[in-house]
Image: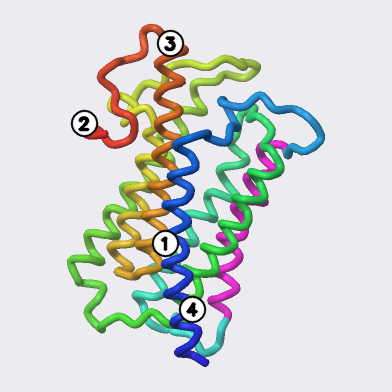
Amino acid sequence: MELEERRALGLLAALLALLGCLVFALLQGRVKTYGRHGSRRGPWVLPARLSWVLQELPSLLAPLACACSPAGRLHHWPNRLLLAMFVLHYAHRSLVFPLLIRGGKPVPLEIFLGAALFCAFNGYLQGRYLSTYAVYPDDWLTDPRFLLGSVLWLVGLLINVHSDHILRSLRKPGDTGYQIPRGGLFEHVSAANFFGELVEWAGYALASWSLQAGAFAFFSFCFLFPRAKQHHRWYLEKFEDYPKSRRILIPFLL
């Protein structure tokens, strides 16, 4: 039974990577609009704050539920720390970030449902693997992969949080317009918040050194790059003085 579930988790990781390829291909054609790119109104939408809480919460609750398994491996420090890295991100994303939203356009129901299902799936995948099956050598905490990956994870998290703060600060109370973001990595890319998230999950994948985490990092790029490209194009079309030197997602490269 244990071997079968371990294989199933490997297949689910492969499915996640394939899903990333599918999402990337679909978003190249027609990005499903929401936020600044959407204008949808009607009964089938959720308020922005409520949507963020409910759609991100499964990525927090699923690994915590997996951690309750009495026969798990969370007595090993690598497993504990890696799971804590994942949980910390989604504790912020589901419980803190929504409270800081200023304004925020309603989210179409189908986008909310898709995000919630993905978060439940990925939360279970990462949580179950780390809490029950991931085996690391005794010296993993001093392994260069874990050390470098952890640093990248922390740097990416800080970039993501700081970039979100810059975006929120652009809109004063009662202001409904858009402005060019300035400061931080926004001086180099149009989607600094997305870049931070990519660095974060690339670091997590390196520190975890697992197929499950690697598939998640790959999916994140497949989903975020088309969104970043849409943001970049929108800025160029809306603002004549938008800095032409800014890249889309990766400073100086892409």
What separation in Å lies between label 4 and label 3 (alpha carbons)? 49 Å
Q: Earlier in the sequence, mark 3 or mark 2?
A: 3
Is disc 3 placed on a helix, strand or loop?
loop
Q: CA distance from mark 1 to mark 4?
A: 23 Å
Question: Which residue corresponds to mark 3?
Answer: 239
Q: What residue is at 33 percent from the left and 62 percent from the top?
A: 205
Q: Please give the residue where the numbered disc 1 appears in the rendered image.
A: 85
- Overall secondary structure of the magenta stretch? helix
**Circle 1: element type:** helix
The residue closer to the viewer here, 234 or 162, is: 234
The magenta region covers 47-68
Residue mark closest to the camera, 2 vs 1: 2
Label 1 crowd (10 A; few <14 / some 14-19 / many >=20): some
x and y percentages locating residue 239 in the rendered image:
43, 10
Q: For the residue marked with disc 2, what is the amino acid?
A: Phe
Q: Amino acid at mark 4?
A: Ala
For marks 2 and 1, the one nearer the N-term is 1
In percent of width and height, residue 11 lies at 45, 73
